[in-house]
Image (cartoon, rainbow, N blue to C red):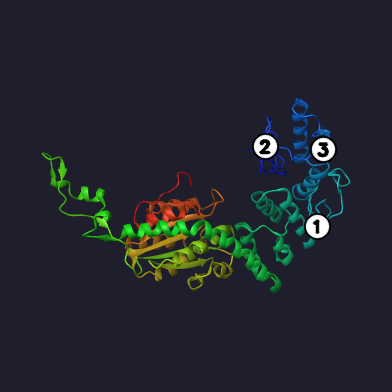
Amino acid sequence: MTGTPDAPAMPGTSDTPDGAAATGTSDTPDGAAATGTSDTPDVAAATGGPGTHAAERLRRWRLVLGAGSGSDGTGCELSGTDADMDRTLQALYGSGPPDGSGTGPGSGQGQGSGQARAGGRRAGGLGASAPQVARWLGDIRTYFPSSVVQVMQRDAIERLDLSALMLEPEMLEAVEPDVHLVGTLLSLKAAMPETSKETARTVVRKVVADLEKRLAARTRSTLTGALDRSAKVRRPRHRDIDWDRTIRANLKNYLPEHGTVVPERLIGHGRAARGVKKDVVLCVDQSGSMAASVVHASVFGAVLASMRSLNTRLVVFDTSVVDLTDELDDPVDVLFGARLGGGTDINRALAYCQSRISRPAETIVVLISDLYEGGIRDEMLKRVAQMKAAGVQFVALLALSDEGAPAYDRSHASALAALGVPAFACTPDHFPEVMAAAVEKRPLPVPDEV
């Protein structure tokens, strides 16, 4: 998507000064890409000349501007696929209010012309019917790739207030499943009719399965290695010797005449024995802004719970605290057990987690929250300090998602940093490395920018 607020870039090209790109072909000298059709007279002109590039630029601007005010100066009429694409974009990114009288698929207006409705104003609107929106969702899948479809779906839900229509089974069958859609469904589950719940679970399960496929193997591999390295033994096998630590521990035995160190004591890593080696507590803020983090935390919780060397507990909270550990064998059940929205009482959640710690020196607590505390701030910080003093490895993540830099309470983040707990946002791909460092009690790999 481009930086143009009301019109996205068509997929298939890089960002260009022209502000839009249509689908399906390679780049041209002016950064444009054609749709692959020859329906537009200007584009069907002789190829290779400067006029062709100028016509393509006008065509792209016409798709960006729509058929309303400001686009007439292009002198470019759309037909065929271009006109259909224009109607699809106009239904979502039009400048007018979503009053249901726009030109989206199924509205019966502007078929084959790509023109604005009466009054010359480009106005968005998908109408109030689920079948009409479902047809529009099918259309955008025809013209755009999956990554763009997901963005347009999210924009439609936010801009046109389509949340209520997400409760309709036919709507759920038409959407492209992604993490943001799961967050929307979870926030609506209390109002979801029985006829929609099974379809919603199917959508959620597909997203969860995709995340597990992407993240599970690497997480298990990374943490298994970290657990092995954290199991210290006094008489390690040769392949398990930690040579750096062994040399540092035996520098007093350096023989300058031989230029070598005589190691009286070997330090190494043993292979992690069977049984629980570490306790992990995931403490997840389920306020509305943390929806994507709740989805990823549920998947990671299930992955960690599948590892016999880890005893994993999952706690979600708003102003109340819910322990979902018993549901960790199925992340879908975990997600439907969460309740997105509400206030935030981090102190209360940490008090519950603290009460469940029996081996502080072998425990990792991961707080996933934007730190907007509605409870008692000083008590929250006091509990973190107590857990740290007892030997708990405490990790504070402002978000666990791919959404970029989150909004968060900077004063609370600074207070945690003063306690030796850096608070930072973490992507799902980076999370295994963070957990491995916590397992080995190494400094956490904090990104350069938080």
Q: Residue 252: percent from the left, percent from the top?
A: 14, 47
Nearest the eye: 375 or 130: 130
Nearest the eye: 397 or 329: 329
Kindly report the distance in space between the C-alpha atoms of the residues bearing marks 3 and 1: 29 Å
Q: Secondary structure at mark 2?
A: loop
Q: Is residue 272 left or right of residue 449?
A: left
Q: Does label 3 or label 1 sit earlier along the sequence?
A: 3
Q: Is residue 178 left or right of residue 429?
A: right
Query: Quick check: 386 above or below 83?
Result: below
Q: Quadrant of the N terminus?
A: top right
Q: Indicate which disc residue 127 carries.
A: 1
Tag 3 near tag 1, CB within 8 Å: no
- The residue lying at 73 percent from left, 38 percent from top is 34
* Label 1 Cα crowd, 10 Å radius (few <14 / some 14-19 / many 20+): many
Q: Indicate which disc residue 40 carries.
A: 3
Tell me the amino acid under the disc marked 2: Ser
Q: Does label 3 or label 2 sit earlier along the sequence?
A: 2
- The residue lying at 68 percent from left, 29 percent from top is 29
Tell me the amino acid under the disc marked 1: Gly
Tell me the amino acid under the disc marked 3: Thr
Kindly report the distance in space between the C-alpha atoms of the residues bearing marks 2 and 1: 35 Å
Tag 2 near tag 1, CB within 8 Å: no
Nearest the eye: 166 or 21: 21
Is any part of residue 341 visible from this angle?
Answer: no
**Which residue position holds label 2?**
26
